[in-house]
Amino acid sequence: MPSPFPGMDPYLEAPEIWPDLHDALASEIRNELNQTLPTPYYARLEMRPELGIVEEGKVTHRIVPDITVVRHPLPRPAQGAMAVADRPRREISSSLDITVHLDRIRHHFIEIRDSLQGHKLITLIEILSPTNKRPGPDRDAYRRKQREVLDSDANLIEIDLLRSGDRVLPDLNLAALLDEVDPAPDYVVLVNRAWRRAERVGYEVFPCSLREWLPCIPVPLKQEELEVPLDLQYVFNRAYEGGPYRRGAVDYTRPPSPPLSETDATWAELLLRDRNQAASS
């Protein structure tokens, strides 16, 4: 079942939905690359745990809902009735069951390695999570990993399909240039080739609007070798069609979280209405 949106689906950016899409995207990228990478390269999934904790002001909280509350109501005495405790009660009072989920969030990323060079890391592909883009331990850990790769001879691809939060950019000049892009991109994909870092021309930038297809990007391997195209819209479509999003996991009758701008909200409302009318006809 296809997504109702032409590119990225903004409804899937919600913190409670994003981890499922993140895992599905990583798996589909791994699968696609293993069909197209030349020998001796291969792509594999790796995982690091994230706490899911962000710091906003002086408040620390988990960005993914981690508490389940179940109410157990019981009939109450009629209003105004006088309760007389002439004997001990045997009926348990109404209560709340509160379950706190402390499991860490799995953050999957993709590594391209060379089987002929001791499985050397060639290219790292990261899909940013909501906590990578907000102050907290997960952002700090991501920045350390980002710097580790940029200081190595491995290539780095960073896929940011989240409108909210601050981009994790290693260079202030790059951040300033992206701020000048008009219209401001909703999503950004960055490709950093290891051999171009010495020239200080490190990034190929793919800005993307909510209303257009996700880009087809090059996957660099080694200098002078052909780069492998990776169609992000194709892998997103496969992740969506195999997911639970149009099967009840997402409520498309409500505004997405985070919210859209007024003009994008109007566009999305008309798009969803037209898709629903076409599906019912």
Image (tube, helix red, strand yellow):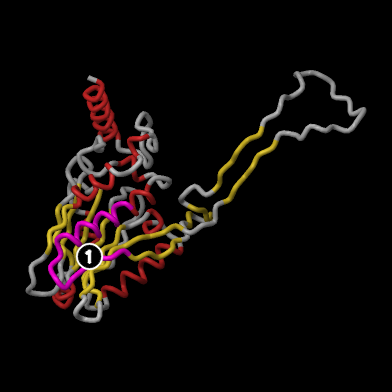
- Name the side, left or right, on which 40 lies relative to 91: left
- What's the amino acid at mark 1? Asn
Quadrant in which the N terminus appears: top left
Magenta run includes residue 4 = no
User: Could you tell me residue 113's position as x and y percent?
Assistant: 23, 72
Q: Quadrant of residue 251?
A: top left
Spot the residue most to the right.
Answer: 86
Q: Secondary structure at mark 1?
A: helix
In the rendered picture of this protein, how many numbered marks are placed on residues?
1
User: Could you tell me residue 235's position as x and y percent?
Assistant: 22, 50
Vertical placement of residue 75 versus 65, above or below? above
User: Could you tell me residue 264's position as x and y percent?
Assistant: 26, 35
Q: Quadrant of residue 85?
A: top right
Q: Quadrant of residue 261?
A: top left
Vertical placement of residue 214 versus 222, above or below? above
- Name the side, left or right, on which 242 lies relative to 54: left
Question: Residue at horizontal 52%, vertical 53%?
Answer: 61
User: Could you tell me residue 281's position as x and y percent?
Assistant: 22, 19
Q: Residues within 10 Å of mark 1 (few under 14, many from 20)?
A: few
- Name the side, left or right, on which 166 lies relative to 278: right
Question: Residue at horizontal 91%, vertical 30%?
Answer: 87
Question: Residue at horizontal 42%, vertical 62%?
Answer: 138
Q: Which residue is mark 1?
A: 173
Depth check, front residue: 161 or 88: 88
Depth check, front residue: 255 or 225: 225
Q: Which residues are magenta?
A: 24-45
Vertical placement of residue 162 versus 248, above or below? below
